[in-house]
Image (tube, rainbow, N blue to C red):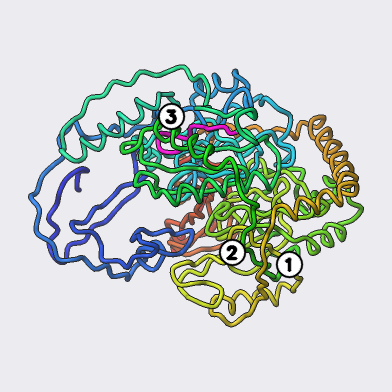
Amino acid sequence: PVPFWQVLDIPAGAMLQLGATTEGGARAYVLFRGGLDCPEYLTSCSTFTLGQFGGHCGRALRAGDVLSLPDCEPVQRTTLPADLKPTIGKTWKLHVTYGPHGAPDYFTEQDIETFFDSDWEIHYNSSRTGVRLIGPKPEWARSDGGEAGMHPSNIHDNAYAVGTVDFTGDMPVILGPDGPSLGGFVCPVTVISADLWKLGQLKAGDKVQFVPVSQDQAVALREALDESVSLLTAATTTVTPIKPQTPILASLSTDEHETGVVYRAAGDNYVLVEYGPMELDIRLRFRAHALMLWLRERDHEAILELTPGIRSLQVHYDSRALSQRSLLDLLIGAEKELEKQPEWDVPARIVHLPLSWDDEACHTAIQKYMQSVRKDAPWCPSNLEFIRRINGLDSIDEVKKTLFEASYLVMGLGDVYLGAPVATPLDPRHRLVTTKYNPARTWTAENSVGIGGAYLCIYGMEGPGGYQFVGRTLQMWNRYRTTEFFEDGKPWLLRFFDQVRFYEVSAEELQQIRRDFPNGDYPIKVEHTRFNLKDYEQFLADNNHEIQDFTGKRQQAFDEELQRWIESGQINFSSEAPIEDTGEDDIDNLPEGQHAVESHVAGNLWECLVQVGDTIEAQRPVAVIESMKMEIELLSPVSGRIVEIRREAGQAVAPGAPVVIIEENTD
């Protein structure tokens, strides 16, 4: 046995065996002097298992893998001082800053008070992607999200900060290091950078309370942590919780600026810049684009990343090198220089993509969602029927016709993940408006195509999601190959202001296309053009009468669907009750020779693989538990016959809950 927090000399031939976590915390870490010898991918050696790249072959380690260690000097064997060891238990306090979204725009004041007063339980379906929370649902300060979606949590897509608490409908999720970079849900608080390490130790059943702190305190806590790690000495800091006032740091009114600008806090290292009213207006996207180009030209060393959304730009910066106030002064000053823009005209492409309509992969994701997340969702079992109904169309064929006629303007990239576009039809008469899943799916097939609000997304990789499915297409991201459509060092297919148009292929044809396209063996049609905002606005003016007729009919159907939701109670979704051990499962008094196969973790019984009367060999799987975004097999401890099944598919299970009872074979 090896205690934590020590430097060890490992002799050649030794074996390190890692067991299950038995007390507080969810993960153990092993650090190697000099690191592991792995190739860089996009300037990093870390592994992104969802994207299947980085680290060792882009995946988790398997038996038989060989890892190389670089030559390095030996290090003195030592143990970390006791006062530097973090407390890892089952109850946590996470320090957060208020924002980017809050009261009174999205939440009520009572919602925010309830959020901070509550003890939130960690949901079993949590991982590096996001940590789901069980707790009270908000009252909400508005009835819906308009063009962004039917639920009040829905907003026009913007970038997410790492550690932000994202309300995917009524269920909050703390977005982790593998979480989505862009999305369309409100986020009331963001975990400060000094506390991000805690996310890796949150385990199903743990309790969390959020503690609001000021920007100055957040920066001080980060600096103290950095000093403590660097010097291996304890750094004392005093934390004084504050009463949150507003997530808005500054604003420019429409008297001061053509569209108006709002500057929102998003943790201690991000600021979200929003333009104009909360509506879909392509002019606002150009505003964000202009600010992004202006900041790129200045190339400030403390500004790390710029991510545009539909009507916003998120600025990721190092608050230790650039204060929040100085950044705000820079951003506000930029608007004065950008007041008089020349005619907005940008290079663009029309990219034609194959689409397998209503693909089987979409059916599988819907089935998983109904079984393990929400059975009564009004968009299930058919997302297409839901899209038809909410848009007031006469048939699903009309949905299909509209989709294939539309030309989708790419307004953001990385929507959810990996070069995934968030796009909207240029012609408002092609804009099918839906709501997003509440709560979000835990699984979506790579390159599924969906609609959420007035936007279309092509999922860049396998992962969670909330858009209503219409089909599936080819890859948005090419992990390792440079082809005609994937430039060296830029593995994403689309660019800002591209237009996407679909043509139909069968599911079988798409499977072959998906095999060929990453190798450069499937050509797609790409037309080069330009997008001129003045010409586009003239098109809208010329067709204004028909556009108004279409949007009026769509709004009527939207309002009718919303009213049905309110009357039936489907508008809200209550987070699942905590998983509790009821004590009803008595396995201590099983007859001699019988053995219980217990769940190791809190989760959901995804599938039972055996039936009563079946015979099974030892160490063979009998059931699959869905937990922490993984499917975990439960193995039979003995050879024998199945005599009882204690849990059904779709049922929640607590750690230690018996799933199957086996009578051991004594022959």
Quadrant where the C terminus sits is bottom left
Q: Quadrant of residue 159?
A: top right
Q: Magenta segment: does it hold 264?
A: yes
- Residue on which the image places disc 2: 494
- Residue on which the image places disc 1: 502
Give the SS element for disc 2: loop
Q: Quadrant of residue 573?
A: top right
Q: Residues within 10 Å of mark 2 (few under 14, many from 20)?
A: many
Q: Nearer the viewer, mark 2 or mark 3?
A: 2
State the separation of the CA atoms marked 1 and 2.
14 Å
Give the image location of residue 344, x and y in percent. 64, 53
Question: Residue reaching furthest bottom?
Answer: 521
The amino acid on which the numbered mark 2 sits, given as a three-letter code, is: Leu
Work out whether 107 lies above or below 228. above
Q: Report whether 310 appears left or right of 541.
A: left
Marks 1 and 2: CB-CB under 8 Å? Answer: no
Q: Nearer the viewer, residue 412 or 196?
A: 412
Give the image location of residue 233, x and y in percent. 15, 33
Q: Earlier in the sequence, mark 2 or mark 3?
A: 3
For the question of whether residue 2 can be seen, the reply is yes
Q: Earlier in the sequence, mark 1 or mark 2?
A: 2
Residue drawn at x 48%, y 32% is 265
Q: Quadrant of residue 303?
A: top left
Q: Report whether 625 appears left or right of 23.
A: right
The amino acid on which the numbered mark 1 sits, given as a three-letter code, is: Phe
What stretch of residues is rendered in magenta? 261-270
State the separation of the CA atoms marked 1 and 3.
43 Å
Q: Earlier in the sequence, mark 1 or mark 3?
A: 3
State the separation of the CA atoms marked 2 and 3.
35 Å
Q: Nearer the viewer, residue 377 or 189?
A: 189
